[in-house]
Amino acid sequence: MPEVRTVATHCPYCALQCGTRLTRERRGVSVRPTDFPVNRGGLCQKGWTAPALLDVADRLRHPLLRRDGELVPVSWETALDTIAARLHAIRAESGPDAVGVFGGGGLTNEKAYLLGKFARLALGTSQIDYNGRFCMSSAAAAGTAAFGLDRGLPFPVTDLGGADVVLLAGANPAETMPPLMQHLRSPDLIVIDPRRTATAEQAALHLQPLPGTDLALALGLVHIAVTDGFSDTAFIRERTQDFDAAWQRAMSWWPERVERVTGVPVSEQRRAVRMLAEAGSAYVLTGRGAEQHSKGADTVAGFINLALALGLPGRAGAGYGCLTGQGNGQGGREHGQKADQLPGYRMITDQAAREHVAEVWGVLPEVLPGPGRSAYELLDALGTSDGPRALLVFGSNPAVSAPRAEHVVSRLTSLDLLVVADFVPSETVELADVVLPVTQWAEEEGTMTNLEGRVLRRRRLQVPPGHARSDLEVLHGLATRLGEPGHRYPTTAREVFDELRRASAGGKADYSGISYQRLDAGEALHWPCPDGEHPGTPRLFLDGFAHADGRARFAAVEHRDAGDVPAEEFPLTATTGRVLAQYQSGAQTRRVAELNDAAPEVFVEVHPDTAARAGLAEGALARVSSSRGSTIAAVRLVPTMRTDTVFLPFHFPGDGRANLLTGDALDPRSRMPEFKVSAVRIEPHREVAP
Ligand SMILES: Nc1nc2c(c(=O)[nH]1)N[C@H]1C(S)=C(S)[C@@H](COP(=O)(O)OP(=O)(O)OC[C@H]3O[C@@H](n4cnc5c(=O)[nH]c(N)nc54)[C@H](O)[C@@H]3O)O[C@H]1N2
Ligand SMILES: Nc1nc2c(c(=O)[nH]1)N[C@H]1C(S)=C(S)[C@@H](COP(=O)(O)OP(=O)(O)OC[C@H]3O[C@@H](n4cnc5c(=O)[nH]c(N)nc54)[C@H](O)[C@@H]3O)O[C@H]1N2
Ligand code: SF4
Ligand SMILES: [Mo]
């Protein structure tokens, strides 16, 4: 496909998927924001500097193979033949589940779909999951249980602009999705965050709970809503179920008890409920701060209970939503790269789903494996007696971003074969036996589904450097070497999308009416879109929720401790999150000079009193330790912090990894790790003499 001079496309990073126009100038690629609804001419610093990603100095240009401990350039033939031969041997010896696949929420819909198909058919393995398990899986579990369907925002982002009040529980969009803030300008904001973030600074009300106590807070807000007479009894009666069971739990969370557990004053709890209840139009939104806990699904359910008690969901101008994070965090969870799932948001244990997908794939349903391990459990099992011996990674950098990172690195290095497809030499690439250089956003075609469920076109501007190939071509090359017919793995995104449409038809996330033709003609299409004449569904649930009886479900949830509770040796709570200039594991943004200059190294935010007690001054190097390990970080004194809490961003490598602290507590329903709570101590870092 030829190069073009200019294309309309979207930012390579987060789930807002801001609209951009790329142009090739003599001095390189330039980017401009477009008047796309989510960003309306705005971009954040990452979006403005995105073209620099296309030619970072150490861009991967050749396949690499580890020989005598060193990664050396080889041809594609050699790389793919070597992988296929080793996979053959491992499978012959140890069976198909001895090979695992780890995907990502940054992959296009087409890649995510083909990766899931490749795992189930070419490898025949059940062992596939992806980094979205680390992201919004708790909200997905709670949303599915409550509404019968999981679409992050069941309404367009622009609806938020018409609200009177928006409650943000554990989200910091002023840093994580800056252009979203223009839609939050008119409403009064309520922010629930242990830190006084840039978002909290703009709020009318900031509730500052101890990390890991949001569920108690949500139960308390429901308690106040009911006892102060703010609940919408007609809505509860006509459009929901199970209120009584939920109320049984919330009943005992009177405001003073909630204050004791969370630290949020009673007056502020009451004010939050009053603001939401008296608004004509109000939304409750959750982010990772509420979700990344070993009780994340129940915590989100607690906030959904609050929204339901106030009668917000299921009508225009109000509702509940989750702010999905990764570029294709929404589409990435719909097309079958999840351990328990087939395309169209179908469940792999559902016989009808298996029959439908098997027919589209031209195989018998018995051929499809069953459900596999969740992301952390998969990483934890690598190289163990009953775990995978080989892993293929597409679109993730778990050596930095997975919980209990040092343990995960030891699992990755115990493998017989680690294959990583990426376009930069990430910390996980550095551990690989074979590295496959792939194309990135402006070098490929495809679709992404943004946080409001709108399907968008990613368009190609130019050819990739060196010998980089698209992930689709890589999967084709591997599958055919594993004995699969080539036609099962199309190499153009459009062909894959047309197959995805058929595979998703009749599923919850039904894309069958969405085509490249309609998208390229400029139609705004939100799934479900079940036929070519269907206008798509920007607003869900207006006529009923997705359960068979059309009613939403309250959840009978109860507060409980985090997996790690501060005690003598580790008296503080460490929580983790993001800064504006770095993205995720930092594999991409640490290579963009302007971004890395803005946030060059890991730091730990500490209250001045807490720091003084530990003998730490501004800028000093601190050792932050949990029972799992230690992170070395520069101290930032922040007077608005809670004295019992510290914060570290997770974007940095080496001994600056925040995930050296995090543990293996998982949510029992979503299998989400507890990124937001680790019991730690903090002390001056002393270099140990060698
Ligand atoms: N700049 C930037 N933007 C990004 C990303 C990035 O890496 N960098 N990543 C993208 C992705 S994948 C995601 S998932 C989103 C995430 O977007 P957000 O959810 O906004 O990001 P986080 O910083 O992880 O968490 C939000 C807030 O939760 C707070 N928090 C910590 N513990 C708790 C708690 O127990 N309760 C409550 N209520 N709050 C708590 C933190 O202090 C933090 O301010 O951002 C997307 N956008
Ligand atoms: N402590 C702590 N840890 C966290 C979090 C937290 O809040 N605190 N947040 C978690 C969350 S929400 C997330 S989403 C994860 C994210 O963590 P990761 O999964 O590590 O995310 P990225 O850093 O985006 O890694 C993506 C990698 O894939 C590459 N890549 C990008 N696009 C493509 C593609 O199309 N194909 C291929 N083959 N490669 C591609 C990139 O160059 C990069 O190396 O981190 C989680 N870890
Ligand atoms: S908010 Fe997200 S999509 Fe928009 S420019 Fe920034 S990183 Fe890109
Ligand atoms: Mo995420």
Image (spheres, rainbow, N blue to C red):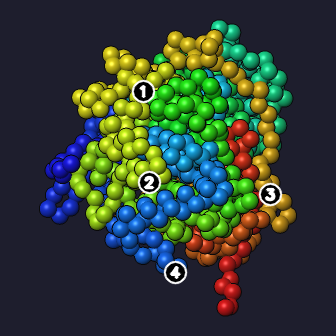
Whether residue 46 sits left or right of residue 6 in the image: it is right
Quadrant containing the C terminus in the rendered view: bottom right
Per the model, the C-alpha gap separating discs 2 and 1 is: 26 Å
Residue drawn at (30%, 49%), measured in percent from left and top?
444
Mark closer to the chain start, 2 or 1: 2
Given the image, on which type of amino acid does mark 3 rest?
Pro
Per the model, the C-alpha gap separating discs 4 and 2 is: 25 Å
Which disc is residue 566 wearing? 3
Given the image, on which type of amino acid does mark 2 rest?
Arg
Mark closer to the chain start, 4 or 1: 4
Q: Does the Cβ of the disc 2 residue fall within 8 Å of ligand 2?
A: no
Mark toward the viewer: 4 or 2:
2
Per the model, the C-alpha gap separating discs 1 and 3 is: 51 Å
Mark closer to the chain start, 2 or 3: 2
Secondary structure of residue under mark 4: loop
Residue 238 percent location from the top left of the image: 65, 8
Badge 4 vs badge 2, beta-carbon distance below 8 Å: no
Badge 4: few (under 14), some or many (20 or more) residues near its Cα, within 10 Å? few
Per the model, the C-alpha gap separating discs 2 and 3 is: 52 Å
Residue underneath mark 4: 68
Mark toward the viewer: 2 or 3:
2
Mark closer to the chain start, 1 or 3: 1
Badge 4 vs badge 3, beta-carbon distance below 8 Å: no
Whether residue 61 sits left or right of residue 147 in the image: it is left
Residue drawn at (49%, 36%), measured in percent from left and top?
335
Q: Where is residue 638, by image quadrant?
A: bottom right
Q: Does the Cβ of the disc 3 residue fall within 8 Å of ligand 1?
A: no
| Depth check, front residue: 226 or 660 | 660
Which disc is residue 502 wearing? 1
